[in-house]
Image (spheres, grey):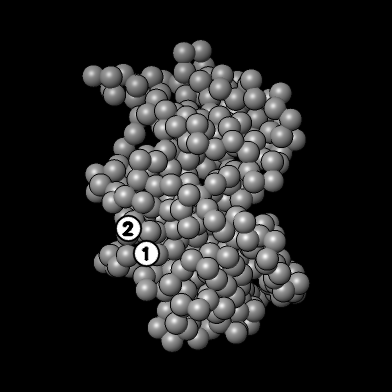
Amino acid sequence: MTKLGRLYSLFDTVTLPENLPYTQCSAWELQFLYLVGRHHLTGRDRIVELGSGGGGSTYALALGLSESPVFDRKTGRLHAYDFFRVGKGTFASEKFFDSGHRPEDDTSFLDDFKGRLEPFLPFLEIHAGDLWQTSDPEDTSPVEFLHIDIAKTARVFRCVSERFLTRMRPGTVVLHQDFAGPRLPWLHHSTGALLPYIEIAGPPIRSTLAFEVTKPIPADVLERITEDDYTVDEKLALISAVQERIDRDHTGGIPFKSVLELSKAYVAHYDGQHRRAWSIAKPLTSDEYLSRTRADHFEQLRKAYEKEPPGGSKLTRLLHKAVGR
């Protein structure tokens, strides 16, 4: 077991403030962020949160860092990245505003975020805007910790991979907060590609998968992840490899084997193979958890299947023919 895995035994020792900023993370995930900051991180390398939102997760992590005996508040930095505004493509909630709704003349909740994180501003470095614009392509400094709650699209995940995953070293800790999201299969098959070089800390903490890099990751592996250089069949096999490592979350509530199976359907769906996607998804409609929480996913996949002509779309057939040459 890695040091990261030992944090599970400390959940009962954590009491967080009752007035934490609004967040879409669960109490378990916030406690784990606190524990990582309090008992694991040093601040010698970059500590990065991608997708800080309203600040609840940032607060929990920063509180842990501030109480750590080894983190130096004068030299250590917590880097917080987010649009810090609501609107199309941001996936932000109006609940991130102090008032609970967006003012008529403003889309930014950055000032609200700064107010909530005021105790930690001396060691908090805020990067507001599109990640492609606010991250530095020339920065190759090692990352000690990476909390990923921003990769809602393939475009953003490419930036995450190109500019942050490539800076992982043995000892780097990664938290994938959206790992229970079947519509984000890049999180799942990229983790499958990394399995020979990482150790999963334990069962997912609700929707968050935590792992620690234990071996140097070859540059070609990271390049393939960044370039999305895998066939559909390869991606499905990589997700299957992850299914062999995890089952339910640590509370027993989320059946990750089923979640990842539905993720496979989205691999095919995004490739235009809607018939194949539905053939994967349809048997899962009887899964109690998925039928209750992912009904809209099944509807999306079913509609795409029903619209696809027999034999698949012309474009899809041509692409598959070209790949097979």
Residue density around tag 2, few if under 14, some if 14–19, many if 20 or more, within 10 Å = some
Instruction: Give the amino acid at mark 2.
Output: Arg
Instruction: Give the amino acid at mark 1.
Output: Val
| Residue 31, quarter of the rendered image | bottom right
Asked if 92 appears above or below 59 in the picture, the reply is above
Asked if 119 appears above or below 263 in the picture, the reply is below
In the figure, is residue 28 to the left or right of 260? right
Asked if 275 appears above or below 231 in the picture, the reply is above
Closer to the N terminus: mark 2 or mark 1? 1
Which residue is painted at 52% across and 16% down in the image? 309
Q: For numbered disc 2, what is the local secondary structure? A: strand
Label of residue 143 in the image:
1
Can you tell which of label 2 and label 1 is closer to the viewer? 2
**Picture coordinates of residue 147, whole percent (x, y):** 50, 60
**Residue under circle 2?**
169
- Camera-side residue of 105 and 122: 122
